[in-house]
Amino acid sequence: MFAVRAASRLAAIRPQVPVRSMAGRPTSGRGSKPDAQLTFKEAWLADPATYPIIVIISTACIGCAAYCAKCLFGSPDVRITKTSRSQIIRDWS
């Protein structure tokens, strides 16, 4: 019984803080959209804390694409042209 009274007193004293979403806006209240309807700009670019994540993921994607291109065009084992693929014995000269 005492716990119920104490909880109700604390709820009356404690200010109500709105629940915040990733973009730093309240998820409930006037004029807010559900998270599924947010655009990329509203969800990611509105919050400066997401900038390091964007930079890290972009750098990883660019590095992966560069490594794939290096392997595709620089490796002698990869044969793109039909004449190279039809060779039985490999010639790396």
Image (cartoon, rainbow, N blue to C red):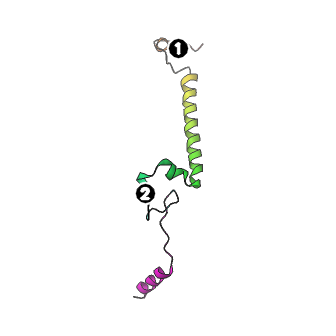
Boundaries of the magenta span? 1-21
User: Quick one: label 2, few (<14), some, or many (20+) residues within 10 Å?
Assistant: few
Label of residue 46 in the image: none
Residue furthest bottom as drawn: 2
Q: Which amino acid does label 2 sit on?
A: Lys
Measured as percent of width and height from the top left, residue 21 is found at 48, 60
In the image: residue 31, left or right of residue 46: left
Nearer the observer, 29 or 5? 29
Q: Which residue is drawn at 49% across and 48% down?
A: 40
- Against 68, is 5 above or below? below
Q: Which of marks 2 and 1 is in front?
A: 2
SS for callout 2? loop
Magenta stretch holds residue 20: yes
Which residue is label 2 attached to?
33
Measured as percent of width and height from the top left, residue 4 is found at 41, 84
Q: Quarter holding the N terminus?
A: bottom left
- Against 87, is 27 above or below? below
User: Quick one: label 1, few (<14), some, or many (20+) residues within 10 Å?
Assistant: few
Magenta stretch holds residue 73: no
Residue furthest front as drawn: 31
Nearer the observer, 51 or 57? 51
Q: Distance between the residues labelled 2 and 1?
A: 60 Å
Q: Closer to the N terminus: mark 2 or mark 1?
A: 2
Q: Check if mark 2's residue and mark 1's residue have beta carbons within 8 Å.
A: no
Which residue is label 1 attached to?
90
Q: What residue type is labelled 1?
A: Arg
Q: Quarter holding the C terminus?
A: top right
Q: Residue at x 49, y 63 (%)?
A: 20
- Against 26, is 72 above or below? above
Measured as percent of width and height from the top left, residue 30 is found at 44, 64
